[in-house]
Amino acid sequence: MLSGSIEKSTVRRRGAKWALGTGWLAIIALAFCTVLSAEDASRSGEVEILVRGPDARPMGGARVIVTPAARASDAGQTQQLTLQSDVEGRVHFRWGNGVVRQMEVHVDNVGYGFAGAVEVLPDRTATAPLAPLVP
């Protein structure tokens, strides 16, 4: 009977050591991810675009797709973003720092356009110019 309780005690200690080691590993991983996300945030900035329909009215509540133009994949941004415009017709998103030459903006069943050049910086919001969408 004594050997059984010693075995259980040893198993419990090993389990506690494993849990403690796993806990430290989780803390280290979390700290690493926090540092990486802070670095990513410093390498990107906020961008705002006012989306207007062909009638030049702001398109509040529209599903907007923003894609780096094929000839202007700047700042490492290679994927399209699907966004929802606010009530004023503005979309806000993060984009890699640097000069962005062109972004394609598309709203299904409404039209498309190309936002002009803008410099994205980490410390302020960049406003990309966009003419009313073409049907």
Image (cartoon, grey):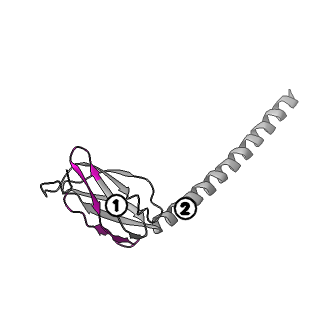
Q: How many marks?
A: 2
Q: Is residue 85 magenta?
A: no
User: What residue is at 87 percent from the left and 31 percent from the top?
Assistant: 3
Depth check: 10 or 43 in front?
Answer: 43
> Are the two marked residues, 1 and 2, in contact with CB atoms closer than 8 angstroms?
no
Q: Amino acid at mark 2?
A: Leu
Mark 1 / mark 2, whichever is N-terminal: 2
Q: Magenta stretch?
A: 106-132
User: What residue is at 83 percent from the left and 33 percent from the top?
Assistant: 7
Q: Which mark is residue 103?
A: 1
State the quadrant of the N terminus: top right
User: What residue is at 39 percent from the left and 58 percent from the top?
Assistant: 68
Q: Residue 97 in the image: state x and y as whole percent.
A: 43, 69
Q: Residue 37 in the image: state x and y as whole percent.
A: 51, 60
The answer to whether residue 45 is left or right of residue 52 is right
Give neighbour class at mark 2: few <14, some 14-19, many 20+ (Cα, 10 Å): few
